[in-house]
Image (cartoon, coloured by chain):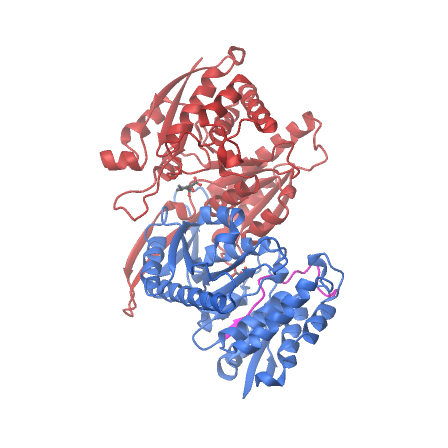
Chain colours: A red, B blue
Amino acid sequence: LLQERGLIAGDGIGREVVPAGRRALEALPASVGLKFDFVNLDAGFETFERTGAALPNVTLETLKTECDGALFGAVGSPTHAVKGYSSPIVALRKKLSLYANVRPVKTVRSNPRRIDMVIVRENTEDLYVKEERTFDAEDGSGKVAEAIKRITERASFRIASMAGEIAVRRHKVRQASGAGSAREPTVTITHKSNVLSQTDGLFRTTANVALANYPVTVEEQIVDSMVYKLFRQPETYDVIVAPNLYGDLLSDGAAALVGSLGLVPSANVGDSFVMGEPCHGSAPDIMGQNIANPVATLRSTALMLEFMNEEEAAAKLYTAIDANLEEGKILSPDLGGKAKTDEVVEDILKRL
Amino acid sequence: LLQERGLIAGDGIGREVVPAGRRALEALPASVGLKFDFVNLDAGFETFERTGAALPNVTLETLKTECDGALFGAVGSPTHAVKGYSSPIVALRKKLSLYANVRPVKTVRSNPRRIDMVIVRENTEDLYVKEERTFDAEDGSGKVAEAIKRITERASFRIASMAGEIAVRRHKVRQASGAGSAREPTVTITHKSNVLSQTDGLFRTTANVALANYPVTVEEQIVDSMVYKLFRQPETYDVIVAPNLYGDLLSDGAAALVGSLGLVPSANVGDSFVMGEPCHGSAPDIMGQNIANPVATLRSTALMLEFMNEEEAAAKLYTAIDANLEEGKILSPDLGGKAKTDEVVEDILKRL
Ligand SMILES: CC(C)[C@H](C(=O)O)[C@@H](O)C(=O)O
Ligand SMILES: CC(C)[C@H](C(=O)O)[C@@H](O)C(=O)O
């Protein structure tokens, strides 16, 4: 079976880490029975400057008609407002109906902190609908800008159901491995319904309804307390489900707990398409130096495989990555190491 | 000069910590030349259940006509949506035009981490305008709820100017004390203009314009990275200015860094009124046990004095609190101690 993958390197270190993901897919042992074909696609700020479009139509069409999955690197944000430019990742998520952004945050075994959580972020609505307008204040006091935060029952139900499924799946894996089988599968619903009673209230109510269908413990946490607790007692969380914007902030916060953004993967998941994406940005300060940490992208590649039900291939890749980190000898500079991007990739691939 | 202070204890531990603030004001040495009169005012969930109004008119009117400052404790959030109830603190901030929420986060001297930052949060707009509506999706897929996020040039200018003033004032204090005079006064503007180009774009642009009037270094940080950096390198921040919601989340995050929410104060500041408010909530799990940490409220009391230009009185109170924490003998349970609320208060007051 030949599987077609889109590779969208984007800007900055995206161009250094996406090739690592490709190499990992090519290096998977024949025993897993997967063969991939790749197509390189443009998107990002450099593409915008060159072509006038941050997300060219051909990129979108190729993904839609020829690919069943993709890897996305990172795109740069211009330092000043640039007319007509808007980040292509948000558009990709929406146009490919990738309604869930799944971000596992986990420490390796030798870490004294036992963090092992997944943030399940709604990926299509909330303030990310980007419906904004600007007008002059009636009293002459200057400009006023408004944005719509939209929460739907449909998207809230869908994302909470995915959180429920992930919690159940994780629990099964824990039980199978004999590790932590005592831990109950738990989903924590995050919201700010004490202020936003209708929008976040709808998210809260709907998530509770959806999660009643799963054998999981359901908890709630107001988002500001969630940020606090994320830092004070991260070990206690299993699956966290959140509307788009809170999910964005919480996952960066969780990433800080495990030492480096360079370790944290994500998958943008839809019903028939998955796009892996490292949580880090384009990091212009270190681009071109071959020192970017490829782990976030390699983990995103494994996550993509996992959500395409290629669990054996995913497990092999995760195991190789963990072995590299556990050994702790060939690490990139963000982890205190001296290895180049390529050296880390090679060390991981040879463990496959 | 007799100064009238409103005391709004609210719910839960609010009723245990607000009296501590009152005692501190009464215990200030005569040399500072302040004399206070107090009036107890109702607000909160218990008030709502009893009277049908979470913020009775008489509370608002008394604050407006008789008081020049107030201390607010905390109010409970009902665990389930309750019709007609909405948190009175948001209303108070808006109705008293307390446009800035100032939250200093600082470690004591003996702490190896040297965190000393102030989060200056816009306090009147953003999603806190609470303009929401709910309707049925056209395609029959269920309910849709929308909220308005409103950012104005006027409020953004005002809050950034306050951030600039605070940065300058802090720098003067550092220079006077000989400590850290090498550190440049810096204001970090936080926003998400890569997604919200109009609303957060307006905040960003306006804040830059306002801060150009101050002798401070101006930096910018996208809010998700800000959460990440807050946890990775909190020592590098001086003053952070943010729209309402981001400020809410960032200040809880910052509080996690200093060990306990029970340490972190805030002041709601307007042109002619200041309301001190601990950052913690009503903590129903520990209420009535006399173990709540009074430090956040005592620091909020000092902060209130500071913003009323009673700097000598404020300094005395801060010094007494720091001395208690540095000694580390009489601490509440959240800090690993065994002392009761009253014992902590007494230890601090005797140092005044
Ligand atoms: C680049 C930006 C638009 C994006 C987001 O806000 O979703 C990023 O922060 C992320 O988390 O993938
Ligand atoms: C209680 C709640 C409405 C409030 C807020 O969101 O502002 C609180 O979290 C705070 O930070 O003071």
Which quadrant of the view contains residue A254?
top right
Tell which quarter ligand 1 is in: top left
Foreground pick, B166 / A212: B166
* Residue A29 visible in the current orientation: yes
Image location (x, y in percent) of residue A206:
53, 45
User: Left or right: where does residue B71 sit relative to residue B290?
Assistant: left
- Magenta part of the protein: which range? B274-290
Question: Hey, which residue is sitting farthest right in the picture?
Answer: B338
Q: Quadrant of the C terminus of chain A?
A: top right
- The number of discs equals 0
- Between residue B112 and residue A56, name the one nearer to us: B112
Asked if A221 appears above or below B244 in the picture, the reply is above
What residue is shown at x 30% (from left), y 54% (from top)? A133
Along the line of sight, the residue nearer the viewer: A111 or B36: A111
Residue A264 visible at all = no
Q: Is residue B200 left or right of residue B237?
A: left
Looking at the image, which residue sits at the far front? Answer: B178
- Residue visible at 47% across and 71% down? B269
Which quadrant does the N terminus of chain A fall into?
top left
Q: Residue at x 51, y 41 (%)?
A: A157
Dividing the picture into quadrants, the one containing residue A54 is: top left
Let me know if residue B54 is in the magenta part: no
The quarter holding residue B312 reads bottom right
- Pick out the residue farthest to the bottom: B1
Farthest residue to the left: give it.
A51
Instruction: Give the percent coordinates (x, y) of residue B288.
Output: 73, 66
Q: On the rendered structure, is A85 left or right of B240?
A: left
Q: Can you give x and y, in whole percent of width and height, for residue A321 in the image?
A: 55, 25
